[in-house]
Image (cartoon, rainbow, N blue to C red):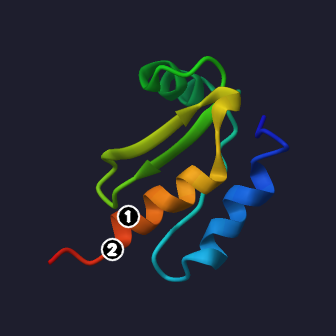
Amino acid sequence: MVCAKLKPAVSGLDEEFPGQVKALNVDASTPEAKKAIEELGFKSHGLVIRSADGKVLFKQPDHTVNLDDARKAISGILKPKP
């Protein structure tokens, strides 16, 4: 089950950061997803930003997800390093 509130917003991140972000909604009810949820310290679901190699760069659990914070985190991650 993908949170109805987050699904369209997460999908829109592809459009906000074209060619830089791959947004993926995951069914949180599968055994694999439940294991990942537990490992991330979430109760039921959340938002995770990972690097291309899978490293967790940012996360917000359950219903505390704030997409403005996620956008700021993405922008900071994508900002060119001096």
Extreme-bottom residue of the structure: 19
Q: Secondary structure at mark 1?
A: helix
Work out whether 57 lies above or below 65. below
Q: Which residue is mark 2?
A: 79
Quadrant where the image shows the N terminus: top right
Work out whether 3 lies above or below 80. above
Tell me how far mark 1 sits from mark 2, CA to CA. Answer: 5 Å
Which residue is at 46% across, 62% downward? 74
* Residue 37 x/y as whole percent: 54, 25
Q: Which residue is mark 1?
A: 76
Q: Secondary structure at mark 2?
A: loop
Which residue is at 61% across, 35% downward? 46
Viewer-nearest residue: 10 or 34: 10
* Residue 76 x/y as whole percent: 37, 64
Quadrant where the image shows the C terminus: bottom left
* Badge 2: residue crowd in 10 Å (few <14, some 14–19, many ≥20): few
Mark 1 and mark 2 in contact? Answer it, CB < 8 Å. yes
Which residue is at 50% across, 18% downward? 38
Amino acid carrying label 1: it is Gly
| Occupied quadrant, residue 34 | top right
Work out whether 37 lies above or below 48. above
> On the picture, is 79 further left or further right than 64?
left
* Residue 51 x/y as whole percent: 34, 57
